[in-house]
Image: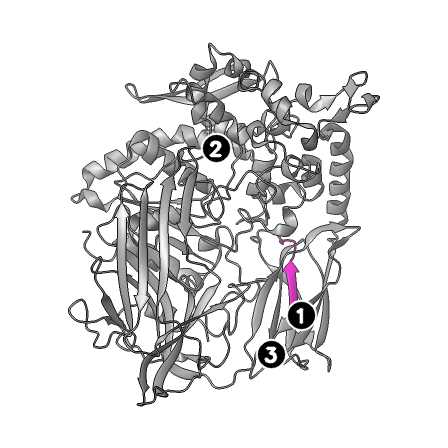
Amino acid sequence: MANFTPNYQLNVVHAFGTAPKLAEFITTLRDQLDNPMKVNVAGHSLGNMVVSSAISDYQAAVNRYFLIDAAVAAEAYDGAQGNNQVVQPDDSTAFLPHTQWNKEFDGIYPSKLWPTNWHQLFKYPISDARQKLTWRDRFAPQVTTNYYDFHSTGEEVLGYDDAHAEYTPSLAGVLARELATFLHITRSNQKGQPNGYQSWLYQEQLKGRTTTGKILGSNYGGWGFNILHFKKFPGGAGVKGPVMVPTVLRPREITNTMLDGVFTDEVLREDPFFLPGGFWTNVGTWLYDRDTKKISWRSERLSKLYAPETGSTFASTHRDTLLARMIPAMSPAAGRIPVPKLSSAAGEERNFDMNGTDIRPRIGPNPPWPANRTTTDWRHSDLREVAYPYVRRLYERIAEKGFLKGDTP
Amino acid sequence: MIPSSRVVLLPALLAFSICHLAGRDPLFRLTLHVLDEEGAPVDRAEARIGAERRPKGEESGGKGVFAKGVTDEKGYFSGEVEAWSANQAGYHVQKEGHYGVWLTFRAKDPVQGKWQPWNPTIQVLLKRIKNPVPMYAKRVEVKIPEFNKPVGYDMVQGDWVVPYGNGKMSDLIFEADRHVQSDQEYHGKLTLRFSNIGDGLLDHEVANPDLPGLRMPYLAPDDGYAATKTWLESRHTLENGEVKIISTASRRMNYFIRVRTVRDKDGKIVSALYGKIHSDFRWFIGTRAPKSGLAFNYYLNPDGTRNIEYDPTRNLLQTSNSDDSAYKSLAP
């Protein structure tokens, strides 16, 4: 796992593979403490995938967990969907889906066809593991851990805005800008982080939209289309007579009759509307043996996912890889937005906007900030990129909430 | 349609390489039109537009390249820079006697060597500093001591009233009621009342809560205050599995506030203290906690006038909280 890769989705897979080892380390550390209530853990960016999995999946006994710039979908901590919730509604207002699904084709493909809802087709029997192929509540907060979300509304890597939500570019479009910028990788001759505006959003939107899946996005699932459903080829019957050239099946052409007769639950389970992936596509996952504490790599054909007899077992084995590569998020990252549930459960504020006055008090109308910055936005990794006097309240707040200055209760 | 990535990938990479080798980045241009709160142009204001330049050597990202100048007699300034990225560009305007502005401008991807939109005109509101006064200013983060019982909060003392704190006068009276089955099933109500007839809150919603400067008017209105305000929090799972959540707090909401109202025998207000609440009251119902929590930011002017322009350097509240300076300087 030591090799470097700029591929975000693969890094997510590695993050899940690392989590059990972090849990082991925390358990060892905790055993050495005179006061076992002192275990504070802070995660930065994708490191939060590791910490969250360690807590949720491997019972890492963490008392206080500080999410900083978390590159994890907010819905993983609160899966409620709807207006003003972290999970966006399945309509044209959502900006997480690839825009071809809810904006570009003069309509919205029925939500039943969306990759983000595929798991709902497997509610029965209750034991089918494919119903867990969703980011929603993947890391539902544990009762024994206090979660604090230090996010920034000035994020660039996890950021987004309306202007960039109108149209999802292709991978080529992304490359035409600057590859390193969008992949948010550090060049060999640079320190710190490059710009990377909206990288995280693109990584989610381009799931299922790239040819190889080796640079950005992925080449199965996601917001790709299953060409057998999506394309009408010459010679087929069209609304206005035989189809002469290949055309796409537009949202308005999908009638309720089609949903009931063509796109039934049974059909979509085995042959989804989104890109199912190639027959030869392999899916690999790090597996942890709780007895031997060893990690091994297991790879299998993706086609097993769609077969009734193997689908559930396959999903159970490769759940996290499928989440990383196949299932897009429907909420912004927790490093960009607050997760209200953390505060409502705790009965106190647990969400802190590092771009706001809580962490950066203003002197006059604006907070003090280095003059060589174009704006006062608190960007990804500014906790280390900006000098301590500007960012010290972040550390003071962590010290206060983590009881690092006094006795632990 | 499915993008034919292989077809467009090569030219895109070629374009990227040529651009990179040439070492020239696209141009970014903005025009600022600076006006005061009465719509009059502000001339000779120091203006700066900036975008991100290409990092040099081992530099980290995020460094800006800037065009600086002053506004003309009509309040205009135009600036142009060569920008590695203008996705998080910005502009900065300041003039003595005014509240400065430093804001983000997000450009879209460049077309033919120019970040889009090319040279848009941005209206910048530069509010004058009129008469900032010392006030009791505080960011409150507290637990509500009791349920189903009115609990007073003293805005001058910055604390709950006795016996829950050292406060003496109940400027704000909160009453919280909650019914919690689990994190997924709960509902509750927080009610705010006041001690005196004439006391109350007056809504003031802003379109963009993130804009710097004076977010509310210089003066509080002398009429229109409501004697009670209620916030609801609930979460229920419907039979069809849909989760229904109600949370009535709004980030865009702010309030004028009037407390300690004294009236004459005809009901006319003789004296009162005016102030403001920045952003909404936030009630944390506490589904896993024994008590609810409450957070809000207030500014209370003790001089009896309706002036609510706060001087951040003169907070009348002295507390031992080392973090309190953050709340003293929340905003003018």
Callout 1: helix, strand or loop?
Answer: strand
- Secondary-structure class at tag 2: helix
Q: In which quarter of the image is residue B65?
A: bottom right
Query: Rounded to the nearest whole Å, what is the CA distance between mark 2 and mark 1?
Result: 43 Å
Check contact, mark 2 vs mark 1: CB within 8 A. no
Q: How is the image coloured?
A: one colour
Q: Circle 3 is placed at which residue position?
A: B37
Reply yes or no: does residue A31 show up in magenta.
no
Q: Position of residue A138 (x, y in %)?
A: 40, 33
Identify the mark at residue B186; answer none if there is no mark.
none
User: Which one is in front in this view, the residue at disc 3 or the one at disc 2?
Assistant: 3
Q: Do the dots labelled 3 and 2 sit on one chain?
A: no
Give the letter of the chain under mark 2: A
- At 41% across and 46% down in the image, what residue appears? B245
Question: Is circle 3 on the same chain as circle 1?
Answer: yes
Range of residues picked out in magenta: B49-57
Q: Please, is residue A74 above or below residue A258 in the view?
A: below
Task: Give the CA separation, mark 3 to mark 2.
Answer: 50 Å
- In front here: B90 or B121? B121
In this rendering, position of residue B251 left or right of residue B2: left
- Residue at the disc numbered 2: A12
